[in-house]
Every structure is written in structure tokens, then in C-alpha cells.
Amino acid sequence: MEGMLSFLLFAGALHVDWGDMRRGRWPILILSTIGVLLSTFLVGAGFYVLVQALGLPLPFIWCLLFGALISPTDPIAVMDVLRRTSVDPTLRATVAGESLFNDGVGVVIFTIILAIASGGEEISAGHAAGLFGIEAGGGVLLGLLAGWIGYRGMRSIDDYKVEVMISLAVVMGGYAVASWIGVSGPVAMAVAGLVIGNQGVAHAMSEETEDYLMKFWGLIDEILNSVLFLLIGLEVVSIPHDVRLAVVGVAAIPLVLTARAISVLLPLGAMRPWLSLGHLAPPTLIWGGLRGGISVALALALPDGSARAVALAATYIVVLFAVIVQGSSIAGLLKRVAARGQSRTQPT
């Protein structure tokens, strides 16, 4: 939470094409807001029933916190598959944009619920909505400002080393300002990454600078994800050996997948009369909604206590399943679904 998430979101946003995102703006907006809220409450409610059945004393608010940290998705593996598959450009943009913004929205929701859980204060729905608006809206405005300043700085020179340093300054300085004024640093850096990755690449960088910048941030992204997985592995080793924690983690896998399916299918069904993403959309968004570094980072940010041990164990198992099982099977699944769709459209 203290900066690492901002680096991850900035690195992810650099590769998202703004033109593609505009085509999928409505499904991106709905899935990354209503979808994340719905997933948070569905996972939280199901997780509460699960831990109560196993005799683990976990309050409902901490179960909601787990729902918030496990709802954001990581599209890196899926985007690589989609580049090699003939899918609708709007769907490809929706996957990238929805994941980028549901990361930021998920972090804001996580922060608000964590404040409630840690402080023990009763916060009304209106107050929570106001906090959400300040955190998210302020983060967007700050991200636009930081991205524009970085863009102007890059446009004024032509030196890839200095321009890479400017991008680092945008993330580190922007996050410091966000913490100081009380808005969401991760949301701000996601928006700044969009500005640098689109406006900056198009009008402020040479091809050499673009190549160095993208490779540098790709490496940063890989290193930080590796560090996060190492940290959660070390944390899980220190968790008390309780078979109930393993049961909770395994049971959380179908719970998270079911919540993801509902939070995707309901908005897609509501949008179907005026926008269809094609038959590949449900399997891509549901099975391809991998959990990764963002969820791990949020789990590691939890304060010490029994709730942290339960959330860490469940997060570790869910993310491990997503990376190994979902990540390795999504390509084959999309090929089978695409082939089935083609066979249905062929005349008999």
C-alpha cells in the first residue's frame, strides 16, 4: 500500500490503448464499479458463512475486506492470449480497461472498509459514498495533472535516460502528493500511466525512448510481482498450522469464481439490448479474471491479527489457483469457445 501498488498500476496502464478503451467505455465503467462492488459483497457474504461454519471467529466487516482485496483482477496473461486470438477489439479493450480500473476502485473500497474495520466506527452509506468520491475522483484529477506534467517534461527533451527518470518521478512524486492531500494514489497513478502511455508515447517520445521506457516498466512490473509472491509465501509459512485455514482457502476458490461470474453476467445481460461483446466475453472475463499482484499486495497490507491470518491463507490459495490453473487453461478454453461459435454460425 505504501507505494508498491502505484508502481504496479502505472506499469499496467502504460500498455492500455486509450482509443480502444473509448470503444469499450461503458462496459469498462460498469464492470469496474458496479461489478467490483457486487463482487465485494458477494464474496464477503459467502466468506462470512464459510468461516462461521468452520468455527473461525471472523467479523463480517473483515470478510467484506477479503471480498474487496480479492475482487480486482490481473489481465496480463489473458491479454497475451487475446493478442494471439481473433477477438472483438472492444472485448480486448474491455478486458484491459476493466482490469486497470477495477484495480483502482478495489483499492479505494479496500481502504474505506479497512478504515471502518480498524477504527470500529459506524460510517453511513452516504459518508462511505462521499469518501469514495473524494478518493477516486481526487485520484483521477491528480493523475491527469501528474501525467500532464510528466508529458510536458518529456516533450521538452529527447533523452531516453532522463525521460525514464521523469516517469519514475511522476509515480513517486504523484503518490507522495496523493498521500498528503488524502486522495487515492493508486487511482492517480493508473490515470497518469494512461496519459504517459498514450499522449506521451504519441507526441513526446522517440521510438528509442518508447522502447526503453516500456521495457523498463515491464521489468519493474515483473520484479514487483515476484517480490509480492515471495513475501506472501514467507507470510503463509508463518501462519499457524490450522487445517481450517487450508479448507477456507480451497472453499474460497469456487466462491470467488461464482461471485465473479455473477458480477460479470448481470451487467453484460443488462447491456445486451444496446451493446454485445460477443460469445467470447463471458469466459474471457470470468475464467480470465485472474487474481494476482494487486490482491497479494492488499492482503499483505492487513494489520496483524487473526483476520490477517485467515485472509492471507485464502488469498494465497486463490491466487495460486488463478495463476496455475486458470492462467494455463484460458488459451485452450477460448479456442474451444471460438471454434464452437464458428461451428454454430456455419450453414448446415
Image: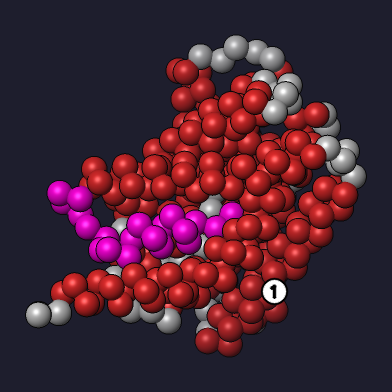
From the viewer's perspective, tell me whether residue 288 is left or right of residue 312: left
In terms of secondary structure, where does tag 1 sit? helix
Q: Nearer the viewer, residue 154 or 298?
A: 298
Q: Residue at x 59, y 54 (%)?
A: 291
Quadrant position of residue 120: top right
Quadrant position of residue 233: bottom right
Residue named by callout 1: 219
Residue 176 placement (x, y as % from top left): 70, 45
Residue type at mark 1: give it. Answer: Leu
Q: Which SS does the magenta portion mostly show? A: loop
Q: How is the image coloured?
A: secondary structure
Quadrant position of residue 19: bottom left
Q: Residue at x 56, y 15 (%)?
A: 123
Residue 237 placement (x, y as % from top left): 88, 49
Residue 193 placement (x, y as % from top left): 54, 61
Residue numbers of the magenta segment: 272-292
